[in-house]
Image (tube, grey):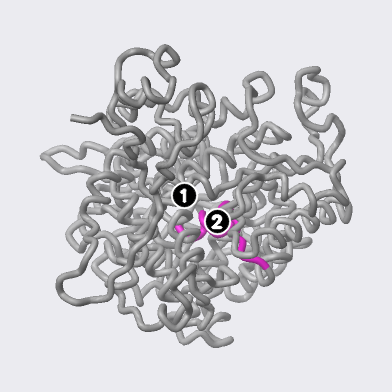
Amino acid sequence: MGNFSHQMRVSSALLKRLRSHQRAIAAVNVDGSRSFTTTEGHRPTIVHKRSIDILHDPWFNKGTAFSMTERDRLDLRGLLPPNVMSSEQQIERFIYTPTVGLVCQKYSGLFRRPRGMYFSAEDRGEMMSMVYNWPADQVDMIVVTDGSRILGLGDLGVQGIGIAIGKLDLYVAAAGINPQRVLPVMIDVGTNNEKLLEDPLYLGLQEHRLDGEEYIAVIDEFMEAVFTRWPHVIVQFEDFQSKWAFKLLQRYRNEYRMFNDDVQGTAGVALAGLLGAVRAQGRPMIDFPKMKIVVAGAGSKLISHWDSDYSAGIGVLNAARKTMARMLGDTDIAFESARSQFWVVDANGLITEARENIDPDARPFARKVKEIERQGLTEGAKLVEVVSQVKPDVLLGLSAVGGLFSKEVLEALKGSTSTRPAIFAMSNPTKNAECTPEEAFSIVGDNIIFGSGSPFNNVDLGNGHVGHSNQANNMFLFPGIGLGTLLSGSKVVSDGMLQAAAECLAAYMTEEEVLQGIIYPSISRIRDITKEVAAAVIKEAIEEDLAEGYREIDARELQKLNEDEIRTYVMNNMWSPEYPTLVYKRD
């Protein structure tokens, strides 16, 4: 929850930078290169409404920014506080409290007006007509949840729509998705939260969750309905419980423009951190397949006291393995070879092929028995034993067990064969982090790379030296993935497009920065990061022959663009907030 709340606190500050960004975009390129224009961000300036109706219409409402002339002519005088504020002043006043998590928890009591659409189990057979109740003829981005695993708070049922609203706010702030073309969606299939089932104020279905084929039928009907009305929309799945996250991703990803941020976004950001760690060791990213990675978590859906996010953990492993395989030639042999770079440890210890009832998703990462015997290990070996014997380049935490990287484990990592070992304590919220940066730097040493899922302060190492704490924030990737997919016109979000996004983020930092141990950028640079990621996604879509174009730019035009022109194309299609003058005062 801390990670997402941090994203939202900074999103208002990002809007300040949009005006300077917008002014920087030239209308004409004097060097003769291809120029693009767009009407994104320009509101209609012919006003057919007056008084309170204007304040209720997001197309026209400027709130306290209406000038006195506009207030007089549009019958707004007296309906607003007297002080006229600029948009910059409005941004300064904006504070994102309470956090999204708290809003979701209290949603039934806070609800005042609809902010999206609700499809429930009781709407079966009606969804195809329901989608036409939404007033927008064009929707570019949908974030959908079933409320089953909201942040670290568990099953919040219909109240989980707050996460869809919040994520789309980030799409607007970071990627410049037009806010009139986004749609938050809640699919209410019931809840297993007994407190909500007994709450008379709860707004959702007060029945236990659908399961099995009944559940899938509801999601199938929803997907068919939204893509029938909006064929070019992108659907991001958010905070679905692990039980369904992978199944739904595999079911829809080759048919619809969709992705799952918890599985693919988290995996991409983690992959970017792993690639950044290679760079921080002074090595080229192509050396990534040589990295030895010990992974704590992601091994089992039934993990005892290890309450890890299984879907995210497996997503990270799969993304890393596929990237290694691509770097090794993208053959079956390369894919098999990449498997041998991972040692996965769950609550029952090191996973080997001798383990009974290995989950199918984790089976590819089970070590061969003879192989680990040569390393002095056995089935079920403890984490500290594995770290001691493997001497890994990377210790990756996906367990959601706070303090799992104990003093003994970190001491064992001092024996790493790497000149600069990397520690990733990726679990959220802060209390679930496998270790803190202070523990990592003080025990393992100053010359490490540290990354985490939750935000931590940098560590003062003395003598003017700083131990950098790098936050692996999904916000670095998912806005660019969505925007790039939209502008490319690709009908699917391919593995190659996701890898291109991760590699772009990994390459974003300068050599000087990575050698200092900085592998992720500042959130303050999010618009530029998103532009670069989106451009990388478009470029990969073109190379895979998936790009079909967007609006007036068709596939052939996209294929003619060089890298700089793709960046310009992206920038010119990023919405920026601006207030047009509706009524002019005569001099």
Position above or below: 102 against 141 = above
- The residue carrying mark 1 is 178
| Mark 1 vs mark 2, CA separation in Å | 8 Å
Position above or below: 486 against 574 = below
Residue at the spot 67% in from the left edge and 35% down from the top edge = 154
| Image x and y of residue 512, in percent | 17, 59
Task: For label 1, count other residues whose C-alpha is less than 10 Å away and answer few (under 14), some (14-19) or many (20+).
Answer: many
- Residue 262 within the segment the image draws in magenta: yes
Is most of the magenta stretch helix, strand or loop? helix
On screen, residue 175 versus residue 106, left or right, reads: left
Q: Amino acid at mark 1?
A: Asn
| Image x and y of residue 382, in percent | 57, 52
Please tell me the numbered disc located at residue 367: none
Element class at badge 2: loop
- Residue 175 within the segment the image draws in magenta: no
Disc 1, disc 2: CB below 8 Å?
A: yes
Q: Residue furthest front?
A: 586
Q: Visible in this render: residue 86?
A: yes
Magenta residues (range): 256-269
Q: Amino acid at mark 2?
A: Asp
- The residue carrying mark 2 is 140
On screen, residue 327 versus residue 211, left or right, reads: left
| Image x and y of residue 448, in percent | 29, 53
Image quadrant where residue 493 sits: bottom right
